[in-house]
Image (cartoon, rainbow, N blue to C red):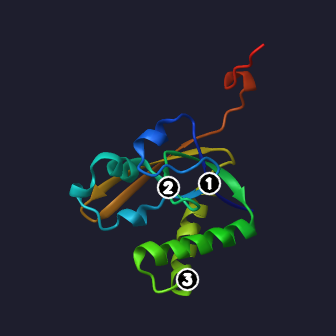
């Protein structure tokens, strides 16, 4: 079984801090490649937040602060790889899907390797810094905790 990250929204903050917030339930990867040629001058406002803490959705290509580890089917994997390859063509100058596909699969492989270290429903957060040699990423995991529904939902009469 393969695992990837799925975007979750614990509150409405992503709607305010990202230029293009991702939707809950979308599949995601770190997406650090988007910042590979950035400098300190690029790190302002909402772009800084995307750089520092944003996961990249593979559906809307928006950003989110929190993801959860979830199983992914082979069909979903193939669909996500194609979408990412097409994104590389449309936004990063790849000459075509066939040329971009190995890179897309490598990115998905990195995400799967990260997620495979955790139980399903583990929350993952990313923190990025700009270093002399490029972008450095650190990941933090919050293990799932069993809790009654009443801890999260308020029911009316």
Q: In this view, does 41 lie above or below 93?
A: above
Q: Is residue 39 above or below residue 126?
A: below
Query: For the residue labelled by badge 3, is the local secondary structure a helix, a strand or a loop?
Result: helix
Tell me where residue 55 appears, x and y as whole percent.
49, 53
Q: Name the residue under label 1.
A: 26
Tell which residue pokes out farthest to the right in this image: 157
Tell me where residue 95 appears, x and y as whole percent.
46, 86
Residue 110: name its quadrant.
bottom right
Q: How far apart are marks 2 and 1 (CA)?
A: 9 Å
The residue sitting at 51% across, 60% down in the picture is: 61
- Left or right? Give the position of 35 relative to 147: left
Q: How far apart are marks 1 and 3 (CA)?
A: 21 Å
**Label 2 crowd bin: few (<14), some (14–19), many (20+), radius 10 Å:** some
- Compare marks 1 and 3 and give the one earlier in the sequence: 1
Q: Mark 2 points at which residue?
A: 62
The residue sitting at 28% across, 65% down in the picture is: 133
The residue sitting at 74% across, 69% down in the picture is: 75
Q: Mark 3 points at which residue?
A: 97
Query: For the residue labelled by badge 2, is the local secondary structure a helix, a strand or a loop?
Result: loop
């Amino acid at each position: 079984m393969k695992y990837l990250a799925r975007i979750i929204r614990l509150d409405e903050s992503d709607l305010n801090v990202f230029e293009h917030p991702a939707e809950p339930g979308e599949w995601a990867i770190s997406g650090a490649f988007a910042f590979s040629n950035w400098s300190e001058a690029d790190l302002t406002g909402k772009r800084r937040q995307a750089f520092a803490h944003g996961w990249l959705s593979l559906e809307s290509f928006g950003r989110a602060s929190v993801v959860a580890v979830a199983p992914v089917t082979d069909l979903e994997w193939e669909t996500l790889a194609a979408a990412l390859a097409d994104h590389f063509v449309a936004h990063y100058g790849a000459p075509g899907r066939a040329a971009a596909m190995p890179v897309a699969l490598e990115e998905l492989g990195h995400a799967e390797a990260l997620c495979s270290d955790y139980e399903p429903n583990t929350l993952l957060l990313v923190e990025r810094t700009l270093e002399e040699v490029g972008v450095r990423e650190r990941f933090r995991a919050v293990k799932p905790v069993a809790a009654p529904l009443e801890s999260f939902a308020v029911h009316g009469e």
